[in-house]
Image (cartoon, grey):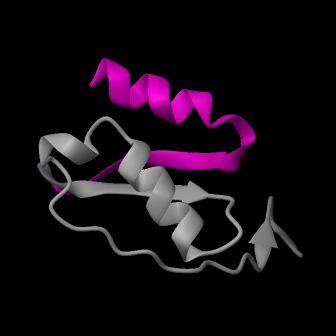
Amino acid sequence: MADHLAFLAKLGPQMIGAGPLFDGTEGHGGIWLVEAGNPADVQALVEQDPFWPTGLRKNVQILEWRQVFRNGQRV
C-alpha cells in the first residue's frame, strides 16, 4: 500500500483525486480522476501502479469525464 500511495503522490497535479469505493462497509475497488491526453495514457499510468503486477487490480474501466461544475459554478 505504501508503494501505491507514493506512486499516486508522485503524479502531482495530474492526479486530481483518488480513493477507494464502498457500498456500506464493503470495498468495491477504487476510482482515479486524472488529467490525461487520451485513454492510452491513462492505461499506461495504471500499469505503472505498483498494484498492477500484484493482481490486486482485476479490471480497469477508463471513462472520459467532462466537468460541468466546479466549486458551485458552471465551467
Q: Does 8 sit above or below residue 58? A: above
Q: Does 51 sit above or below residue 29? A: above
Front-most of 1 and 71?
1
Is residue 29 shown left or right of residue 38? left
Q: Percent x, y for residue 2?
A: 33, 18
Q: Percent x, y for residue 6?
A: 46, 23
Front-most of 69 and 2?
2
Is residue 64 shown left or right of residue 4? right
Q: Please report the bounds of the magenta region as a residue range.
A: 1-25
Task: Assign the N terminus to one quadrant of the image.
Answer: top left
Kindly identify the residue that appears in the image at 61 percent across and 57 percent down: 34
Q: Quadrant of residue 5?
A: top left
Is residue 50 shown left or right of residue 48? left
* 67 is within the stretch colored magenta: no
Q: Does 3 sit above or below residue 54? A: above
Kindly identify the residue that appears in the image at 62 percent across and 37 percent down: 11
